[in-house]
Amino acid sequence: MYTIKLFLFIAPLVISSRTDQDYTSLDSISPEPKSRFAMLDDVKILANGLLQLGHGLKDFVHKTKGQINDIFQKLNIFDQSFYDLSLQTNEIKEEEKELRRATSKLQVKNEEVKNMSLELDSKLESLLEEKILLQQKVRYLEDQLTNLIKNQPQIQEHLEVTSLKTLVEQQDNSIKDLLQTVEEQYRQLNRQQSQIKEIENQLRRTGIKESTENSLSSKPRAPRTTPSFHLNETKNVEHDDIPADCTIIYNQGKHTSGIYSIRPSNSQVFNVYCDVKSGSSWTLIQHRIDGSQNFNETWENYKYGFGRLDGEFWLGLEKIYSIVKQSNYILRIELEDWKDKYYTEYSFHLGDHETNYTLHLAEISGNGPKAFPEHKDLMFSTWDHKAKGHFNCPESNSGGWWCHDVCGENNLNGKYNKPRAKAKPERKGGICWKSQDGRLYSIKATKMLIHPSDSENYE
């Protein structure tokens, strides 16, 4: 542009000079050679200006061409990016439609499950009321039978009484089956809730904002817990002939492992699993074998117990305390990993609920790793009940346990990882557990049992 301006400035000067020279030649006579040289100079100046103009135009064309090429490249990149973005947008829209359809289906299922849960709750309450009435009838019949035997010891049991006892037993078994069905329904409800939470997370990741708080709660919370039904407890029933624990049952001649009813002193009747071994019977208070039962339960459920006595279960802190307060007891812990079995026995003392069921123990014998620190007061805690002054463990550690100053790694009620068939034996799954000496174990199965320390004199 500068060259063009220069040319436009020089050209009029040259033309003006040329015109002045023509007028001068007309007015005055000058020699012919001088006029020629003047014309050649003008031509040279004009040619030089044109040459500079050409160079300037050439440079300008090159620069303009480069800028145009850059613009075309940027336009191509923008077109490609816009095309990719449109494809991704279409995919996201399709995923959004699928998630909306799945959410709608899950909302319908959730409502159905909730209605079913309410129906089961009402049925459960009626069944429990029927069970209490049947137990009262059984008690009345037993009293009548006792009086009959006392008054007529030589007469055989009346056929009507026998049939009534059989009927009552059948009713009791049917009630237990129905309660197990209710528990299964609650487990299915938990699985539905997990699926709904997973769908909510996917919806949040894709940027969908829907008001589904009424049926699909997105508020973070602890895992849903199965209500503790206390399947084995009989309320306000007193039978003087019911044994106080499994040791007395064994001394009465019942030498088979199984579920029995006991009634510790100043306590109600409830069922326990008696594990017969080494010429005696132990009361099983905790059992884990396959991870089928969720142990990330609330303080209330750990207090009164949960699970099934013929599978995985926790007996309940209140029931354990009612047993061990009768005498001096031994705590036996049996561990099984994917290669070996171990056991450790402790003498121990357990406090009541006012002390958060504080545990104090000392090792007696065994070939297994240490499960507890000795000679220390260990308070029981769960994710929703932290003992005062207790180490603040995160909720993700899961499972109630007697803790001291560390979290999670020595908790036999912790999370049970599903087994992996092709993994190494020490990493197959189960409970990831660290003993007091720092060694890490992969526990396949656990048992916690109690037994009087002086079983011969115990009554």
Image (cartoon, rainbow, N blue to C red):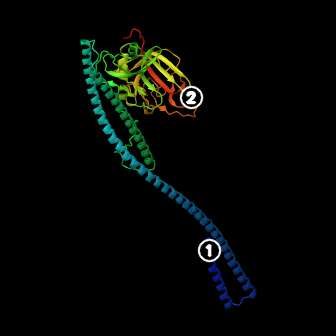
User: Image quarter for residue 306?
Assistant: top left
Residue at (65% x, 88% y) in the render:
23
Residue at (33% x, 30% y) in the render:
175
Q: In the depicted view, which residue is nearer to us: 248 or 203?
A: 248
What is the quadrant of the N terminus in the image? Answer: bottom right
Which one is earlier in the sequence, the residue at label 1 or at label 2? 1
Q: In the depicted view, which residue is nearer to us: 150 or 124?
A: 150
Q: In the depicted view, which residue is nearer to us: 237 or 321?
A: 237
Q: Position of residue 305 (x, y in %)?
A: 37, 26
Going by the numbered disc 1, the residue's amino acid type is Ile
Left or right of 437 in this view: 133:
left
What is the quadrant of the C terminus in the image? Answer: top left
SS for callout 2: helix
Q: Position of residue 82 (x, y in %)?
A: 52, 59
C-beta proximity under 8 Å, tags 1 and 2:
no
Is 153 rendered above or below residue 129?
above
Q: Position of residue 163 (x, y in %)?
A: 29, 24
Q: Position of residue 367 (x, y in %)?
A: 53, 17
User: Image quarter for residue 154?
Assistant: top left
Is 243 rendered above or below residue 181?
above
**Callout in the foreground (1, 2):** 2
Residue at (60% x, 66% y) in the render:
68
Going by the numbered disc 2, the residue's amino acid type is Glu
Q: Which residue is mark 1?
A: 4
Q: Which residue is mark 2?
A: 426
User: Image quarter for residue 398?
Assistant: top left
SS for callout 1: helix
Left or right of 237 in this view: 432:
right
State how far apart marks 1 and 2 are (Cα).
87 Å
Residue density around tag 2, few if under 14, some if 14–19, many if 20 or more, within 10 Å: some
Left or right of 125 in this view: 412:
right
Is 303 rendered above or below residue 458?
below
